[in-house]
Image (spheres, helix red, strand yellow):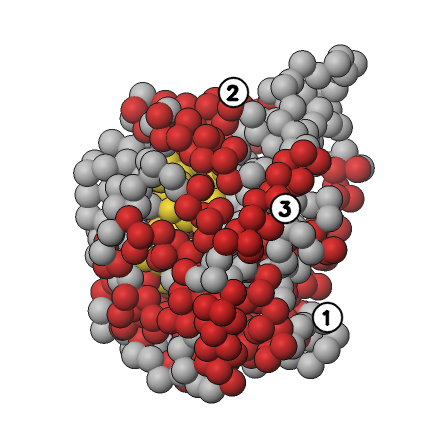
């Protein structure tokens, strides 16, 4: 990218600058730190960057143009100039009625996509009246037992006008079936349904532990979804391969993208092994990343991830469709950075994190609410979070040009460093047989735990400043924040509604459809059609999941994978 003579001239000029200008200042005043490093990776940060730090980059091969291979600068040729990213606030709590009210409120406030949070029983495939569900119904998201609940959630919300992201993994097939059934009832062509299911079970074994079945049948469910959606719902993203929870568990930025792309490789290989052509399903893959506080490190991370995925799909899988090489991703600001101390500081943190996501070219974005370290977000706090995105999109100018930090000597150098470190981690995973085997031997989990431990030590020893926590503290007053709570009455009403559905549904039809699910599980038939039939008969998520538990078993840590 640069003339060798120019590089040598710049190198000499830098040495002269350091001698004449920097050293006298250092002698008098010093610097704030002995060594500056990036937030999580610990890459040394130089005092100043020059063309010599990116002298080995080739513009066309390494950077290129937006919408063109290697997609470093983004997957769309016009960036946000055509339309802004999807503003998709994560929401869902209590009963379906309460969640519908929150969705209607968010849409009225200008949100452009829905993002659905489910309570813990739903995520684990239990009905609200199950013993295991007691005390958890509606707490971490909305309770969904049957199609009746989904009908309530989307009452008055036409599915041909919104896209919906569902953060659901182990029972993703059942929730997707319910969404398709709602679309069928609304008369929406399945080809027009838009949205995403998370459907990323490997990440559950790594970071969240919300799994049901062992990995082999779980991967079978995922590939069945790939195959079904490629034919029936081509605009629906069949998986959101998630680095978000990996980062929340304590990983570095490079580990976040390395472990996430390793999971992606595992899913692609499983689908190919199941007989699918890579270009039939790969365009429907999507990713989900975290946005932390170090703005420039996060921008470099997003750019590196896009470039890496393009290389992986080209070199490992010989993908021919350009869309198969395009890493499209949703971003959520970092929940782990929110503090209960001085919670209004979180408004600032979230704004900076959102800026990093936009400068990094995200396709959709959730901004956390400032009170989430205390409770579920209130209408007031979620409105502030949404307004943060709207101000960013309409007032900041950050969305007016594509990849505005491209060409920055520092950002390009950091992008290259993160990419190289992430590929080194991928090599180590390959040596262990791939992501699934690396998870089985707990190698990935140990890497994250080591980083998380070191980070916590830095905070406790004061080496890492957390504003309002270990520096700049104040004597805490009574926090004047409205708290969003889910009551025991909500749980009672949800169970009563489930009992009513069981009274009026056709039990013979339910049994017949559940038996069809069992038959499909025992064969190599695609599970999605019988699951859709079962949810349309108002079989519960617990009943369908229990059929699959009977056939597939349940996974317990330490058991054979």
**Residue ID for mark 3:** 495
Q: Residue 549: x, y in percent?
A: 62, 73
Reading the chain from its start, which is encountered first: label 3 or label 2? Answer: 2
Alpha carbon separation for disc pair 2 and 1: 41 Å
Q: Which label is found at residue 557?
A: 1
**Residue ID for mark 2:** 380
**Residue 529 visible in rendering:** yes
Residue 426 in the figure: left or right of residue 61:
right
Circle 3 Cα neighbour tier, 10 Å, few/some/many (<14 / 14–19 / ≥20): some
Residue 499 in the figure: left or right of residue 88:
right
User: Of tags 3 and 1, which is closer to the observer?
Assistant: 3
Q: Of 58 and 243, which appears nearest the observer?
A: 243
Reading the chain from its start, which is encountered first: label 2 or label 1? Answer: 2
Circle 2 Cα neighbour tier, 10 Å, few/some/many (<14 / 14–19 / ≥20): few
Total marks shown come to 3
Reading the chain from its start, which is encountered first: label 3 or label 1? Answer: 3
Residue drawn at x 44%, y 41% is 153
Residue 527 in the figure: left or right of residue 39:
left
Is the C-beta separation of discs 2 and 1 under 8 Å?
no
Q: Residue 373: x, y in percent?
A: 66, 32
């Amino acid at each position: 990218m640069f003339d060798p003579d120019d590089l040598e001239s710049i190198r000499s000029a830098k040495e002269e600058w350091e001698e004449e200008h920097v050293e006298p200042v250092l002698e008098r005043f010093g610097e704030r730190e002995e060594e500056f490093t990036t937030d999580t990776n610990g890459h040394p940060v130089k005092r100043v960057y020059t063309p010599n730090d990116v002298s080995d980059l080739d513009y066309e091969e390494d950077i290129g143009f937006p919408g063109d291979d290697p997609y470093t600068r983004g997957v769309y040729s016009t960036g946000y100039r055509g339309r802004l990213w999807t503003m998709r606030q994560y929401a869902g709590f209590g009963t379906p009625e309460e969640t519908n009210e929150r969705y209607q409120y968010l849409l009225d406030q200008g949100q452009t996509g829905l993002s659905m949070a489910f309570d813990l029983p739903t995520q684990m495939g239990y009905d609200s009246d199950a013993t295991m569900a007691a005390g958890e119904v509606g707490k971490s998201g909305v309770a969904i037992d049957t199609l009746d609940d989904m009908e309530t959630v989307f009452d008055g919300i036409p599915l041909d006008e919104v896209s919906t992201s569902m953060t659901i993994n182990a029972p993703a097939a059942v929730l997707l079936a319910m969404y398709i059934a709602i679309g069928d009832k609304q008369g929406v062509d399945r080809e027009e349904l838009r949205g995403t299911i998370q459907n990323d079970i490997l990440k559950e074994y790594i970071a969240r532990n919300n799994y049901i079945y062992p990995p082999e049948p779980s991967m079978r469910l995922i590939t069945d979804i790939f195959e079904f959606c490629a034919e029936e719902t081509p605009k629906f993203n069949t998986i959101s391969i998630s680095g978000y929870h990996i980062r929340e568990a304590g990983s570095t930025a490079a580990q976040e993208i390395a472990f996430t792309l390793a999971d992606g490789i595992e899913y692609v290989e499983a689908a190919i092994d199941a007989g699918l052509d890579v270009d039939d399903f790969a365009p429907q893959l999507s990713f989900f990343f975290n946005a932390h506080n170090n703005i420039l490190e996060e921008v470099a991370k997003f750019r590196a991830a896009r470039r890496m995925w393009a290389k992986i799909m080209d070199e490992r899988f010989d993908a021919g469709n350009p869309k198969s090489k395009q890493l499209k991703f949703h971003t959520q600001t970092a929940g782990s950075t929110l503090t209960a101390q001085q919670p209004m500081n979180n408004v600032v943190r979230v704004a900076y994190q959102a800026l990093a996501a936009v400068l990094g070219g995200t396709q959709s974005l959730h901004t956390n609410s400032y009170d989430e370290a205390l409770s579920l977000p209130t209408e007031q706090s979620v409105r502030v979070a949404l307004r943060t995105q709207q101000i960013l999109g309409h007032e900041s100018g950050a969305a007016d040009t594509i990849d505005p930090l491209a060409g920055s000597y520092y950002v390009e150098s950091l992008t290259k460093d993160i990419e190289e470190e992430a590929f080194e981690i991928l090599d180590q995973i390959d040596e262990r047989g791939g992501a699934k085997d690396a998870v089985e031997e707990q190698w990935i989990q140990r890497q994250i735990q080591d980083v998380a431990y070191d980070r916590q030590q830095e905070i406790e020893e004061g080496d890492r400043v957390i504003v309002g926590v270990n520096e700049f503290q104040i004597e805490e007053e009574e926090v004047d924040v409205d708290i969003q709570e889910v009551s025991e009455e909500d749980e009672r009403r949800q169970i009563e509604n489930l009992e009513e559905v069981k009274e009026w549904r056709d039990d013979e039809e339910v049994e017949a459809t559940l038996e069809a699910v069992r038959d499909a599980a025992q064969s190599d038939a695609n599970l999605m059609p019988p699951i859709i039939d079962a949810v349309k008969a108002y079989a519960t998520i617990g009943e369908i999941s229990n059929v699959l538990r009977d056939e597939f078993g349940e996974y317990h840590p330490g058991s054979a994978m």
